[in-house]
Image (tube, rainbow, N blue to C red):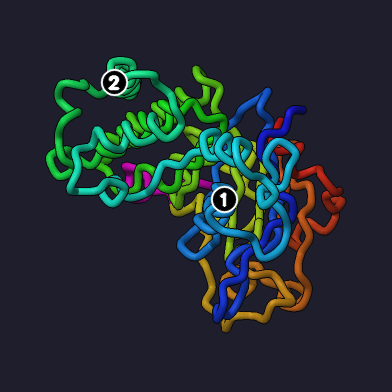
Amino acid sequence: MSTLVELDGVSMSYRGAPRPALQPFSWSADEAAPRIMAIVGESGSGKTTLGNILLGLLAPTTGTLSYRGRELGRLAGAEFVAFRREVQAIAQDPFAAYNPFYTVDRALIVPIRKFKLAGDAKTARRLIEQACISVGLNPDDTLGRYPHQLSGGQRQRLMVARALLLRPRLLVADEPVSMVDASLRATILGNIAELNRVHGIAVVYITHDIMTAYHVADSICVLYRGHLVEAGDAASVIESPQHPYTQLLVSSIPWPEPGKRWGRGVVRASSRPATDDRGCPFAARCPRVERECTQVMPKLRRSSPGGVAACHLLEQAAPLGAGELAGLLQT
């Protein structure tokens, strides 16, 4: 396996915060077999923190981020520039990503200059136009305008075009469709899927919307209060969720029919006083909580052929061995 980027036990604790934002998390991206992995969870679950660590924007409190076998903190010069080019981001806010004093062309011209992608202005213009066309934008209707003159969907697709322009190997998309109209979500998600399928770019798709994760991702990791509570291939996690929190998320997916729900039954969260850090982070809200849940942190166990979950209800299953999770998310 040719590992592009690897997270080895990374965690994050912010100064003054009552608990860690992210508990130890390990994952690797195989350059030879790029896939789309979704990170799912509610606000405060640690999704964006994980994304920022992966992008090198945050130094983890513990653990390491490695790029092509070398720890990121030890990279310098051309190696660090290569990391910056090959690991790119699509931001959540399609307006804040632009400087309102410049036309949107600048967002595409600057990386071309920074990474020396074109030898002259004519070549640069051709690259920009090709990138726009690849995400469904007409260059004549888009380029030369200021950010406020474009719709949110156009601005977000330009961010996808910018990422494609740099030909990255890994794309971190943090809530890329949360601030655009529903009619444009399918288009943007289709662009991201095409980057993976056609251009061979691995994608980490961060979202609170478990339904879009189901449609676009190969594998899904579910976070709750910084803990990984369930993971596996998308079909296993969504169609047969094993952790009560994932069951709650799946049962909350709206149908066009108000009386119809996903899953085998309605899952209702409890509202008990929060437990300390010894037990399961979901114990205070879990409808199936037991005494052990409030006292002992559950281990990740194989919950199905394609998934794992951290829940005491799965104690009959064997705990996951070292390195097994990364392998599961790559298969």
Query: Residue 117 versus residue 153: which sits nearer the camera?
Result: 117
Asked if residue 183 can be seen in this view, the reply is no
Q: Which residue is under mark 1?
A: 56
In-image side of 107 versus 189 (left or right) = left
Looking at the image, which residue sits at the far bottom? 273
Residue 328 drawn at (x, y percent): 74, 38
Residue 190 drawn at (x, y percent): 40, 27
Q: Residues within 10 Å of mark 1 (few under 14, many from 20)?
A: some
Residue 105 drawn at (x, y percent): 24, 33
- Between disc 1 and disc 2, the foreground one is 2
User: Quarter holding the N terminus?
Assistant: top right
Q: Residue 258 lies in magenta, yes or no?
A: yes
Q: Which residue is under mark 2?
A: 121
Please name the residue shown 33% across and 44% down the image.
257
Residue 279 drawn at (x, y percent): 72, 74
Please name the residue shown 81% across and 44% down the image.
323
Q: Amino acid at mark 2?
A: Ala
User: Quarter holding the C terminus?
Assistant: top right
Please name the residue shown 69% across and 69% down the image.
280
